[in-house]
Image (tube, helix red, strand yellow):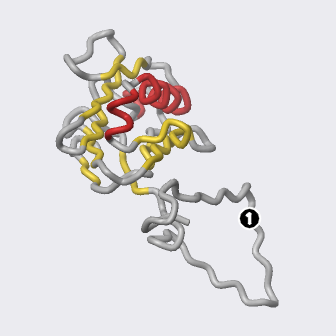
């Protein structure tokens, strides 16, 4: 919700949803100074969306413009996450190889092992968070198809296999 902070615990993998308006604040896009923070209480990475080349000390810049599309904003965030210090990413359980812009371009999937919480800034923010549905753990939708029926999926089906091996949530 615009103007309110969001926190999600044990969040990775996580979806960060970028407004359809991208960086266009007149249409509800990402505002300059909005942040997304990933922290475990000890290690913290804060990504700040920046349109005026002014970022708070310690924040990682996500360079966008008022004319940026949602896909460009999402790509800029993925690039900022990838450019973060490897030691911090590893400490927070962020997997760069599994952090990507989702099909459609208005969502960023932050992949990894759940060790951190993710927060959005309470002011100036309209970027939203949602937990990525883990198959067999918390499916967003369950469909039972009788043997006599078929199911047509209009888009390519992606199957997520958690990176946690034989541990809970793994293969």
| Residue at the (72%, 56%) spot, across then down | 155
> Closer to the camera, 39 or 124?
39
Residue 160 lies left or right of residue 110; in this view the side is right
Residue 102 position in % (x across, y down): 58, 43
- Determine whether 123 is above or below 6 in the image: above
- Determine whether 148 is above or below 21 in the image: below
Residue 93 position in % (x across, y down): 38, 44
- Determine whether 170 is above or below 163 in the image: below
| Residue at the (25%, 41%) spot, across then down | 39
| Residue at the (44%, 51%) spot, across then down | 13
Residue that carries the numbered disc 1 in the rendered image: 153
Residue 24 position in % (x across, y down): 43, 26
| Residue at the (46%, 71%) spot, across then down | 137
> Closer to the camera, 139 or 20?
139
The C terminus: image quadrant: bottom right
- Residue furthest to the top in view is 53
Residue 157 lies left or right of residue 36; in this view the side is right
> Closer to the camera, 111 or 127?
111
Residue 104 position in % (x across, y down): 61, 42
């Amino acid at each position: 919700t615009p103007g309110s902070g969001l926190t999600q615990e044990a969040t990775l993998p996580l979806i960060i949803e970028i407004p359809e308006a991208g960086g266009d604040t007149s249409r509800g896009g990402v505002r300059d100074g909005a942040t997304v923070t990933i922290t475990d209480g000890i290690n913290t990475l804060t990504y700040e969306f920046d349109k005026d080349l002014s970022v708070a000390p310690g924040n990682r810049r996500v360079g966008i413009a008022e004319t940026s599309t949602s896909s460009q904003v999402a790509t800029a965030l993925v690039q900022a996450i990838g450019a973060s210090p490897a030691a911090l990413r590893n400490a927070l359980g962020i997997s760069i190889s599994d952090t990507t812009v989702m099909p459609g371009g208005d969502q960023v999937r932050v992949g990894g092992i759940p060790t951190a919480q993710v927060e959005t800034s309470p002011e100036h923010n309209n970027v939203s968070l949602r937990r990525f549905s883990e198959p067999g753990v918390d499916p967003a939708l369950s469909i039972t198809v009788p043997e006599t029926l078929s199911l047509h999926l209009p888009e390519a089906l992606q199957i997520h296999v958690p990176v946690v091996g034989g541990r809970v949530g793994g293969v």
